[in-house]
Image (cartoon, rainbow, N blue to C red):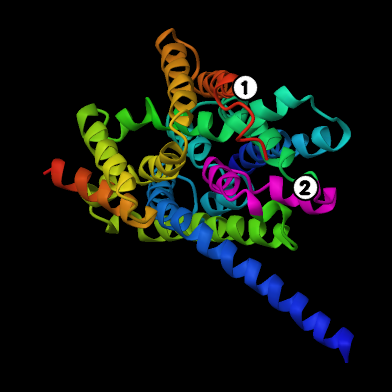
């Protein structure tokens, strides 16, 4: 039963992943679509960060916000992304005593 | 003699691209490990065997969807509902995939196709921030090793989580849940510093996603709507200079 669920999940995840390779190969987009697609990474980052970050600690959304602000500060100071991640983990750890 | 030297330099630039890909994928590895461990622990608690929970990571490779599925398994939800929910949640990869392959126009389909199967929120955003590699020789090796680094960490971490069970203190594993968000922030800020208008794209996407979820839209569709709308605003916001 579980195995069929896993296979079903694998199929519905894989198809949307590989379809674009065929579409882009056989179609040429006008320039404005190119610009749209080039902006997608930044848009995706925004949509992925919020409101999801509020659920880091579901009963205390301010913890996620504080960790997010710590990450913004560290990244703004050009600190390597690995330490940005560790700094945010440390912030949550200290705030959830 | 000459062809031999040529072959060597090809091999070394291939190796070089692989090394750069692993380096670029390293932060994802770091971000995935705690999340994968947590997934493994939760999946084990929901009654899945180690083989099943590891196989899910091998075949699905999509963090949020796997957490969702584990939660639904634990709640006794049916097969069709779970698969449908996973489809909706993961449909955003279709949008990301279009953006990703659109940058790889010079790459052969047989090289692009396996790469698209490695697309996650994290491998997508990191890959697209390394733009120039797409045009370099052996660019596919760069993206493939970046994705395989992330994949190895996801699959390995899931298995370890299943084996370790509750060995990791809850306070630490709870704290590590923020890792992926911190990584998204760490990826976005350098682009915003380079071009402040990029913040407007991200904020547009964020607001649309938030509003859609507030109005009761499913999280998966809300992320798709936010991403599409934010990208659309980029047509005017970015102008010509970001085109490449």
Relative to A12, B181 lies left or right: left
Mark 1 lies on a secondary structure that is helix
Q: Is residue B90 magenta?
A: no
Residue B52 at x, y percent in the picture = 55, 50
- Location of residue B9 with respect to B68 vertically, above or below: below
The image quarter in which residue B200 lies: top left
Relative to A54, A40 lies left or right: right
Q: Quadrant of the N terminus of chain A?
A: top right
Rendered image: mark on residue B235: 1
- Location of residue B192 with respect to B227 vertically, above or below: below
Residue B14 at x, y percent in the picture = 71, 71
Residue B21 at x, y percent in the picture = 59, 62
Residue at image point 70% right, 45% down? B116
The residue to which callout 2 is attached is B113
Farthest residue toward the bottom?
Answer: B1
Please tell me which of labels 2 and 1 falls first in the chain. Answer: 2
Residue at image point 42% right, 12% down? B211
Mark 2–mark 1 Cα distance, whole angstroms, equals 27 Å
Q: Is residue B127 magenta?
A: yes
Residue at image point 41% right, 60% down? B163
For the residues bearing labels 2 and 1, Cβ distance under 8 angstroms: no
Q: Badge 1: how crowded within 10 Å, few (<14), some, or many (20+)? A: many
Residue B38 at x, y percent in the picture = 37, 48
User: Label 2 is found on which chain of the structure?
Assistant: B
Q: Quadrant of the C terminus of chain A?
A: top left
Tell which of B64 and B158 is nearer to you.
B64
Relative to B123, A67 lies left or right: left
Q: Badge 2: how crowded within 10 Å, few (<14), some, or many (20+)? A: some
Mark 2 lies on a secondary structure that is helix
- Nearer mark to the viewer, of 2 and 1: 1
The image quarter in which residue B82 lies: top right
Please give the range of residues in magenta.
Answer: B106-132
């Amino acid at each position: 039963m579980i195995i069929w669920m896993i296979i079903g999940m694998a199929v519905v995840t894989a198809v949307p992943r590989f379809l674009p390779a065929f579409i882009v190969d056989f179609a040429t987009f006008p320039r404005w679509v190119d610009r749209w697609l080039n902006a997608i990474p930044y848009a995706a980052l925004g949509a992925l960060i919020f409101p999801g970050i509020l659920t880091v600690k579901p009963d205390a959304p301010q913890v996620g916000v504080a960790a997010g602000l710590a990450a913004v500060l560290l990244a703004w100071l050009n600190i390597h992304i690995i330490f940005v991640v560790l700094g945010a983990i440390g912030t949550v750890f200290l705030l959830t005593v | 003699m000459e062809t031999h030297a040529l072959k060597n330099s090809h091999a070394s630039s291939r190796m070089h691209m692989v090394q750069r890909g692993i380096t670029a994928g390293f932060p994802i590895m770091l971000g995935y490990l705690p999340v994968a461990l947590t997934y493994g622990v939760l999946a084990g608690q929901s009654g899945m065997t180690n083989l099943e929970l590891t196989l899910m990571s091998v075949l699905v490779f999509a963090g949020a969807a796997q957490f969702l599925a584990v939660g639904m398994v634990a709640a006794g939800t049916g097969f069709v509902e779970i698969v449908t929910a996973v489809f909706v949640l993961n449909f955003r990869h279709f949008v990301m995939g279009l953006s990703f392959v659109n940058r790889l126009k010079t790459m052969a389909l047989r090289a692009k196709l396996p790469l698209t199967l490695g697309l996650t929120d994290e491998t997508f955003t990191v890959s697209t921030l390394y733009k120039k590699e797409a045009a370099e020789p052996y660019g596919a090796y760069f993206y493939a090793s970046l994705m395989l680094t992330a994949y190895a960490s996801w699959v390995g971490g899931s298995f370890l989580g299943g084996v370790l069970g509750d060995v990791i203190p809850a306070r630490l594993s709870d704290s590590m849940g923020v890792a992926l968000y911190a990584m998204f922030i760490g990826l976005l800020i350098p682009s915003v510093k380079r071009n402040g208008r990029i913040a407007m794209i991200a904020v547009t996407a964020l607001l649309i996603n938030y509003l859609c979820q507030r109005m009761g839209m499913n999280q998966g569709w809300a992320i798709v709507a936010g991403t599409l709308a934010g990208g659309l605003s980029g047509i005017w916001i970015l102008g010509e200079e970001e085109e490449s």
